[in-house]
Image (tube, coloured by chain):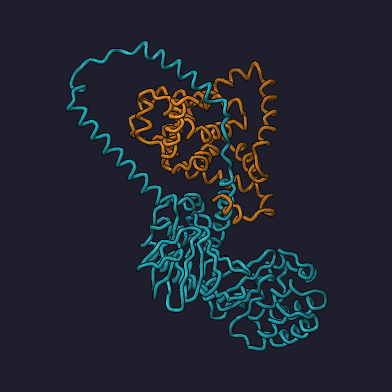
Chain colours: A cyan, B orange
Amino acid sequence: MFSNHVAKDSSAYCHGELSVDESRKFAEHLLLCSKCRNEFDEIKRGIAFATQLPIVSAPDSLWPTLDRQLAQLQVSSARNELRPQRGFLTRPQFAVIAATLVFSSILAVIWYRRAKTVTLNQPFWQVTKVDGIPTIASQGIGNTGRLNVGQWLETDARSRAEISVGSIGHVEVDPNTRVRLLETQPTEHRLELAEGKLSARIWAPPRLFFVDTPSAVAADLGCAYTLEVGKDGSSMLRVTSGWVELELKDRESIVPAGAACETRPGIGPGTPYFEDSSPGFRSHLSSIDFGETRDNRTLALTNILSESRPRDTLTLWHLISRVEGDDRVRVLERIEAFVPLPPDVTREGILRLDPEMLARWRTALERTWQGDMDTPKKGAEAYKEIKNGLTRRMSNFGSP
Amino acid sequence: MSELAAQRMERRAVMAQHLIDGPIIEACRRGDRDAFQTLFETYKDKVFSIALYSTGGDQAFAEDVTQQTFLKLFTAIQQFRGESEFTTWLYRLVVNACMDERRRRKRLLAVEETATLADTSDNSSQETQYARNEVALAVRSAIEELKPKFRLPILLKYIEGLSYEEIAVVMGCSKGTVASRLNRGHSQLAKRLAYLDRHIEISDLAKTSG
């Protein structure tokens, strides 16, 4: 498939100009081709900039000048006008037929334009009831409903719903949940999860689908995950396939399949950890991320380093930029004990948090994070699953 | 204000609430000046914007092109039979008017090169007045710097919101060519405006565009 790169279709994909089959092939290719994904990201940026292009107001002085010119044209036109000859076209019967035709055409045009306007200008997501009576904008829905931009979808203790995210995936909404559709356009689909739990399964290029929570933004990198938000605004992310990025301002956590990450209001995403790590490990991590005293954090770090396994380098790699001084050196050395620094990465570079060196070391560490889990690199199982999902979902393509 | 003038204003307001469609075009064909004005008010900003961006921000050029476009529209509306979308037809007129005016000015430029260049630089203050923020100004500037073959499809897409097929009709090329030129245009925009990436998240841009 890599012999036929698809980046040339990026704009057409973003503007919804590809056929269902073409869109599916495009998305499938992007999932595994980093070259096209990079070009696609660039096109998306170009599109985002182009949408900022302002419409400039024409000067008010244009119409008076134009009006004078029109008046002159009409006068000269009237002088040259020939008297029409009376014939069939001027008979009353013809007038009645013509009027009927014109009226029908007008009705057809109005109907067509309204239908087109509803379809094109009011993007929405299709919501399907799973249990109980979910509401959209406080109105109970039947078996299905439309979630427009700005509207809240709410479930009570007995209701559940499923949302079709355009053509790129679906979201299951658990009981006692409030979600709002913030944006749906070719370059971005965005939900707000105020409270409750959702499960997302997305078959699209990375960073097209986002969920805003009170304490972080979850950016989809081609994956399946659950996200739960508590009454205090804290949240818990669990990734079951692919990758998710959590971000708040300059704090980011990259969470692969099999891992989880907590977030807190005012702090943002904590450090990700694999769910098969010990309860003690998680408790120490929580002290580092959200603990209040420096001493507690240093003690917790000591425990984490002693309990860590090779795949916990996921956690340790994130901690490098979150601890300072001697603690940073300790973390670096612990990771090095599992996976040495790549040839072009230096200790000094890592300690001064050189972004490129950190990224290169992360790439080397990712092998230890895979375990039995799927990742975009290993990806065969995930890809198969995603591809099947895409094919199935694309057959229902139709909403924005 | 006379009663007649008030009636006209009210009628224009009612007409303006609707999309330009059959009845308004029919009224224009009959020579109804109020219908002309409604048509003009509906499209003038978009036509003017396309003309302005097509010429690197030359205000006088854009005004001339806008006037020519609407004059041509009003005189030729008798021939519009609705085989194509009205907007497609209109923007074909804009594109042609831009090309005509550019040819005409090229001839004049040989004589008045210095004066014309000076006029262009004077427009920067008008542009600055108009631009509401740094990003919009930077985008506008970057789009004006694109080659015409990449700039025009972007203008037709983002100013008027035409589909690829409609843009192809206006530009007289294939849909594939439109897709390819838009892709290259977007790519060049992203590269030229890369310095704004640090300050502005793409998601923020997308949000504000909506």
Drawn side of residue A187 relative to residue A304, left or right: left
Residue A56: % across, % down: 58, 36
The residue at the point 55 percent across, 20 percent down is B104
Is A331 situated left or right of B84 in this image? Answer: right
Residue A388 falls in image quadrant: bottom left
Is residue A391 among the parts visible in the rendering?
no
Indicate the position of residue A261 as horizontal and vertical percent values: 61, 76
Assign the C terminus of chain A to one quadrant of the image: bottom left
Q: Is residue A233 above or below residue A356?
A: below
Looking at this view, name the residue that lies furthest to the top. Answer: A79
Residue B26 located left or right of residue A263 = left
Residue B175 screen position, x and y as percent: 43, 42
Residue toward you, B139 or A344: B139
Above or below, comparing residue A307 to residue A228 in the picture: below
Residue sitting nearer the eye, A181 or B191: A181
Q: Position of residue A62 (x, y in %)?
A: 55, 25
